[in-house]
Amino acid sequence: MNFFGYFMIWLAVTGRISKPPVWQMCLYICIGANSQSFANTGALVTCVKNFPESRGSVLGLLKGYVGLSGAILTQLYHAFYDNSKALILFIAWLPAAVSFIFLRTIRIIKIVRQENELKVFYHLLYISLGLAGFLMVLIIIQNRLNFMRIEYFGCAFVVTVLLFLPLAVVIREEFNLMKTKRQALNDLPQLQVVSENSPSAEFLSVTEEPKTEAAAPQTEKHVSCLENVFKPPNRGEDFTILQALFSVDMFILFVATACGVGGTLTAIDNLGQIGASQGYPRHATTTFVSLVSIWNYLGRVVSGFSSEVLLTKYKIPRPLLLTIVHLISCVGHLLIAFAVPNSLYVASVIIGFCFGAQWPLVFAIISEIFGLKNVNPIRVPFTHTCHLWAGLSTTKPTPSAYARCLP
């Protein structure tokens, strides 16, 4: 979808095909722009399912990198292309290539919570903060100086290295896990082999449990999806799609998202025109428009990690944090509305931060209220998940297995 939509736009812009009508161009834009929603949903839902105890941190990291993606693509584009029309072709093939290359890494894994899981996420956070800081400095310098192609290439190389640096953290953790497992196997106690004819074997004999006939499977009555639309379960349990859509909670979330995200996004999209109308110089307008993506990133990672800490330690719910973010964004809107001198700098920071902060909170709230059953390809039973969190096996050892393990 991504490649088809933007590639058709590139063919039309460069004149390689006949000029399409307006509705056809709108269709190409719709297909290309909405393609990222599928990749976004697949990655977010899978990671939240794999790390249910750290969903805030996971969402903050993933949405934070999404916030930096525009600045990252800009640096890569300047390094490889010098034609503005080539940007459309670049946007067409790069996301599609990344999706195909890393497709197998997006998968459900066995949930075994590690002791240092949160510590690893903080290491990934520090790397992303370094990338965001480098991009911020880079944007400011590039707006003041004229870069050559070789300089753009060097900047793109550093950005790529910082982008793939989390792989070093992952490889290190996998190596440590492998080392721990190998050490645990070497530390196993020596087992004594007992012959069946020896007297001590009598003490090891275990009577087998009587076999019980398997109960006849009970046929459950099929319930139509339309019969329980207005009979939702308790909050936190698994809702069906229709139950979630017609619930009061979803309506409130929809209105809050439409007003909060819609209001901040409208202000961000029009910052250039707002700055020009209020008499700001052109270079200043360009600078704070470019830096909005950095504040957007900071809002995403801060809300993701801070909401996890506040919920765990102080029991502060995420809906309350979302309300606070909306109230803070109102301050930015008021600064723009009253045109206070030099206030647009502060307003752009507030609005960019609040726009990014809303996304991890909204996704985490939806997963906490409506469950993950119907937004995830695989459902893990609750008891199974609890055992895996504790690092235990759910398979009950048989008496003979106990006997073989006796020293």
Image (cartoon, helix red, strand yellow):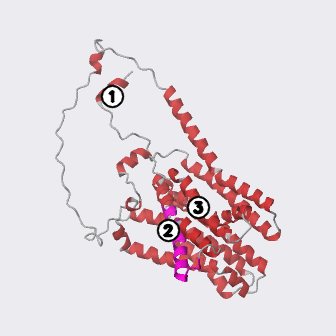
Q: Residue at x 54, y 48 (%)?
A: 117
Q: Dot 1: within a 10 Å radius of its alpha carbon, few (fewer than 14), some, or many (20 or more) residues? A: few
Q: Which residues are magenta?
A: 18-41
Of the numbered discs 3 and 2, the one sitting upstream in the chain is: 3
User: Could you give the CA–CA distance between mark 1 and mark 3, rounded to whole angstroms?
Assistant: 51 Å
Label 2 sits on residue: 362
Residue 224 x %, y %: 25, 67
Residue 359 appears left or right of 126:
left
Depth check, mark 3 against mark 2: the one in front is 3
Outermost residue toward the top in this view? 198
Residue 266 x %, y %: 59, 80
Q: Helix or strand or loop: what does disc 3 sit on?
A: helix
**Magenta-drawn stretch contains 48:** no
Q: Amino acid at mark 2?
A: Val
Q: Amino acid at mark 3?
A: Pro
Of the numbered discs 1 and 2, the one sitting upstream in the chain is: 2
Q: Amino acid at mark 1?
A: Ala
Quadrant holding the C terminus = top left
Label 1 sits on residue: 401
Q: Dot 3: within a 10 Å radius of its alpha carbon, few (fewer than 14), some, or many (20 or more) residues? A: some
